[in-house]
Amino acid sequence: MNEVSVILDVGLCAGMIAAPSVLAMAIAWRCLDFPDLGIEAAVPFGAAAASLVLGAGGNPMAALLVGSAAGVVPGLLTGSIHACLGLPKLLAGVLVATLFYSVNLRIMGGANVSLLGKPSFLDVASDPDSSGAGAASFHVGRLIVLALVLGIVTAFLWTMLRTRVGLRLQAVGSNPDFARSVGVPTRAYVVFGLAATNALGAMSGALLAMHQGFADVGMGFGVLVVTVASLAIGERLLSVWGRRSRQFRCVASAVAGAIVYQCLIVAALRFGLPATDLKLATAILVLVFMYAQFRRPAALTAQRGY
Amino acid sequence: MECDVVLATGVTHQYRAGGRNVDALRGLTLSVPRGSWTMLVGRSGAGKSTLLGLLSGQIEWYGTGEISLEGKSLRVLDGSSRARMLFQVRQDPLTSTAPDLTVAEHLVLADSCPESRQKSWIHRARDTCFPLRSAHTGSFSSLLREHGLAEYLDAPVAELSGGERQLLVLLLAHLRRVPFLILDEPLSNVDDVHARRCLEVLHRLNQAGTTILMVTHDLHVACAHGDRLACVGAGRTLAEFAGAAKNELAPSRLWELMETAEINISSARGAVDA
């Protein structure tokens, strides 16, 4: 029983921290048709920016906001490289991810920055177990803060996707020719859409840095595969939940997928999976879920709208 | 005097295929007066689709001559002003719609003049934030019902058949409220029932003042509809018909015209080669 609660506690926490970056991939890939590798730059860049604010004695709330806003920069860059210079989407993302490795090293002044002793946004609410009053192993305070942040972000995105701006963004991803014919400036939507999704990725980075107590230049490595794995799991889970609007499925599958994936990973580690095999397990997981998704009959795929 | 919607004079255009230049247009001249419905006929490779591509901006124009759209030179028009001036309906409706989006979402995006524009700021804000909600209560459902598509309001466009999809594209053109509509063989993939419905929509649009330029291979449709007709061949205008001449035009006469033009062109080419 204790094992299950530990898995849930750690998995929920990690899942809710990763959820903004999975939401970013859901919007960039599923709505804008842009599998954005630049997300691997946005996550450490958000962490670096947040650590800079915390290092200067800033408020943790300000650190979260600045960290998220910083993500706009790699997003604008990836979008501009693709839309203005005409480079392929993947190459634009790889270039930005590579470029920001050096930028992050410069900002942090080293491969990692310790945030120990600095105030964390996640500890705004105190945990009951830290006062020694109960034997609960849940970090309730931390989970509540994360759930609040994630709730606000998810509600905002769900609403946003149903506005005129959100619909135009999805039109650009689904068929740019159609979008142009109804007067949508497609290039601008790609650039600003990626700026928004990268800000979400950076939010994940800032939250992760505050959660684990340090920012690391390598924390973006493999984010793409993890977000894709989470998304694949989420979409599979949501597909059994009847016919919902595409926007709801997009947002809900990202959040559910992020949490379920992280819980699965924590469980696998607790049950003896060597940490060195983690990436192998993730890749196999992606393969299995993607295969299951693509093997579905065409009619069902069309109904899903993806 | 009111200017023509399209005025093309001496237009040339080349494209590269298989390592050599191909002349798609060799001095094409065409005028499309405001409010007219001009049919454009000609054999495959005559330059009809190239002309439409130049007008819509899909093909970049490096040739000589002059094309003006609403009195403005085509060379200075950008994408957004083109989107305000014209709407293109393609042969394959798949390429004119977004398969992931629902029919209601298409209508919301195409609607250039939301009804709430005249209403209070609360209505405008609600329409901006929740456009789909007003799509259900507004005139969209009655528009779809009128054209037999009511059941599809919330369905992804991928669920529609080819004919239904082309009809939807024409309804989008109606909602765009653009002054000029260009159609590239819009009925060639469409069944008879939907073709008739599409032509009804086009007649209504034309009566409301929309100028139409339509490429078609169906000479019966070309003769039965529209008030002007231009026959092109090998990148040039072979003949233009308007008024009574257009009304009396028979498909057999058009067929003869295209056939003789082909003979003339091939004998001219033979003379050059010799």
Image: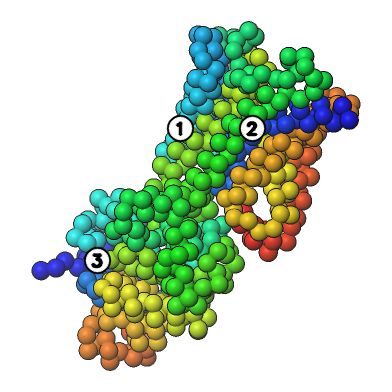
Which residue type does callout 1 highlight? Leu
Labels 1 and 3 share a subunit: no
In the image, A134 versus B42, the foreground residue is A134
Q: Chain of mark 1?
A: A
Which residue is rendered at x = 53% and y = 58% of the image? B101
Labels 2 and 1 share a subunit: yes
Q: Chain of mark 2?
A: A
Up-down relation of residue A190 to residue B88 (above or below): above
How far apart marks 3 and 2 lie (CA) works out to 58 Å
Q: Nearer the viewer, mark 2 or mark 1?
A: 2
Q: How many labels sit on residues?
A: 3
Q: Kindly identify which residue carries mark 1.
A: A76
Q: Residue furthest front?
A: A133
> How many other residues sit within 10 Å of disc 2, few (<14), some (14-19) or many (≥20)?
some
In the image, B54 versus A255, the foreground residue is A255
Q: Quadrant of the N terminus of chain B?
A: bottom left
Q: Nearer the viewer, mark 3 or mark 2?
A: 2
For the residue labelled by badge 3, is the local secondary structure a helix, a strand or a loop? Answer: strand
Q: Residue furthest left?
A: B1
The image's mark for residue B157 is none
Which residue type does callout 2 highlight? Ala
Q: Nearer the viewer, mark 1 or mark 3?
A: 1
Which residue type does callout 3 highlight? Val
Q: Kindly identify which residue carries mark 3.
A: B6
The image's mark for residue A147 is 2
